[in-house]
Amino acid sequence: MRLKERIEQLREKLQHASPDQLAALEQEARELLSESKNTPVEADAQALFAELAKLNKPEAKAVMASRKTGEKPSLEGLLRRARIRIEMAGDADDIDEALDILSEALATKPENERTITLMQQAAEHNDQAAMRVRDLFSRYGIDAPVRPPAPPQQPSQAEPPAPAQQAPATPPPAPQQPQQQQPLPPDEAPAVPQQPAEQPPRSNQAQQPLPMEEDTLLEPIEPQQPSSPPERERPVNREPTQPIPLDELEAPSPPRYGGQPYIPQAPQQRQPETPPAPQQPSIISQDVDELMSELTESYYAGNYQQTVDIANRLLARDPHNAAAQDYRQKAEDNIIRGVVPDHRIPFEARVSYNRANSLVRAGNYEEAAKLYREARELAERSGVLNWNDVEQALLDIQDLA
């Protein structure tokens, strides 16, 4: 017999099986799973075996027993439990538990739109959940789309840059030939200043520069150091001369370079560069780091209201801080859902809660409800006013008690 047909027959047996028959069906599903290794129906066998393993738990057996006796759990309670499981899902096991609860709700009322919507949300988490939702929809004849989980985004490879187009090389400019100086006509020639008459050297009289030929470069004249001190000359009696007025003195002709008068330029003085001022560490960044440290400590300590207050102070200084926005959103969600960290629950309340869970597995719902209330009272005395797990457990067993 083909494996596909055996899987379908086992699924039909599961629909009409009693809690006592689940162990035998699970053994048969395990054999089918080992035979379907590396075959196209391996995924179907895995999904069927996982469903049987979930139903074989004590909690699931209690639910199946209540179905056989005619007791139906509240649809609102089932949807509430499934919604909490989906919103707080951390791995594939949480999604499987949510689908177990939704399958019970689907059996109670298949046409409920909220049930179908929650199942579509659960199918978006992984491929196994999507396959299980399709099987449940086909079993109950529900025509609703099942969206597969989104594939992980792969980083797009950057395209290589296009080679830059080289601009056509421009030919270098032709060298300019030196212009030959044409002689000027006699009537346009500049007047040559007349040399003054020879006069005895005077200390206050401006000395004439050495005559220079045109088209010659100026070369600095190095002073000659005397090898030996000159002999002192005897003073010569000279006749006093009249000083020449300044307005009658002729200005010396400036030296020429290339036919044009050479005008020396004064050297430009470089102003000292002012070194940049050292950057001081920002006080705001230090405050942000301290607030981020306080935010992390308060969140993991379970002080969610304090986490929201610190995140608001941090966002007032840095509105674009993604970490502060994320911590504030998580803390607000935990406040709404009534999430309480395990280290804040007293030891006596935890013991009562675990004993109540054991009584639920044994089917003693009345005693379990008493222990749940006792655990809630012990937690309230220690300051835990909202323990969501206890409240949810009381809602789950109120129809079975």
Image (cartoon, helix red, strand yellow):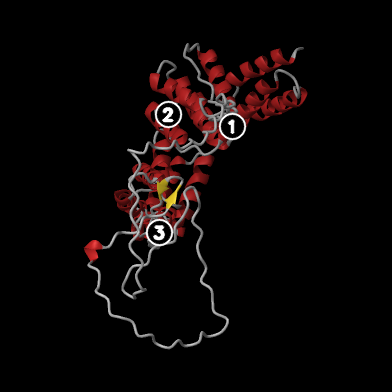
Which amino acid, mark 2?
Pro
At 48% from the left edge and 13% from the top edge, which residue is drawn?
Answer: 142
Q: In the structure shown, which secondary structural element does the residue marked by tag 2 occupy?
A: loop
Where's the N terminus, which quadrant?
top right
Q: Are discs 2 and 3 less than 8 Å apart at CB?
A: no
Q: Residues within 10 Å of mark 3 (few under 14, many from 20)?
A: few
Find the distance from the CA under tag 3 to the CA under tag 1: 94 Å
Q: Provide the residue designation for mark 1.
A: 54
Q: Is residue 156 left or right of residue 23?
A: left
Q: Earlier in the sequence, mark 2 or mark 3?
A: 2
Which amino acid, mark 1?
Lys
Q: In the structure shown, which secondary structural element does the residue marked by tag 3 occupy?
A: loop
Residue 147, image x and y in percent?
Answer: 50, 20
Observer-nearest of 134 and 220 = 220
Q: Provide the residue designation for mark 3.
A: 267
Q: Residues within 10 Å of mark 2 (few under 14, many from 20)?
A: many
Residue 214, image x and y in percent?
Answer: 47, 49
Where's the C terminus, which quadrant?
top left
At 51% from the left edge and 26% from the top edge, which residue is drawn?
Answer: 124
Judge depth for marks 2 and 3 and give the one in front.
3
Query: How many marks are shown on the rendered structure?
Result: 3
Observer-nearest of 173 and 383 = 173
Residue 163, image x and y in percent?
Answer: 59, 26
At 44% from the left edge and 52% from the top edge, which residue is drawn?
Answer: 341
Find the distance from the CA under tag 1 to the CA under tag 2: 18 Å
At 52% from the left edge and 34% from the top edge, which residue is drawn?
Answer: 177
Q: Provide the residue designation for mark 2.
A: 73
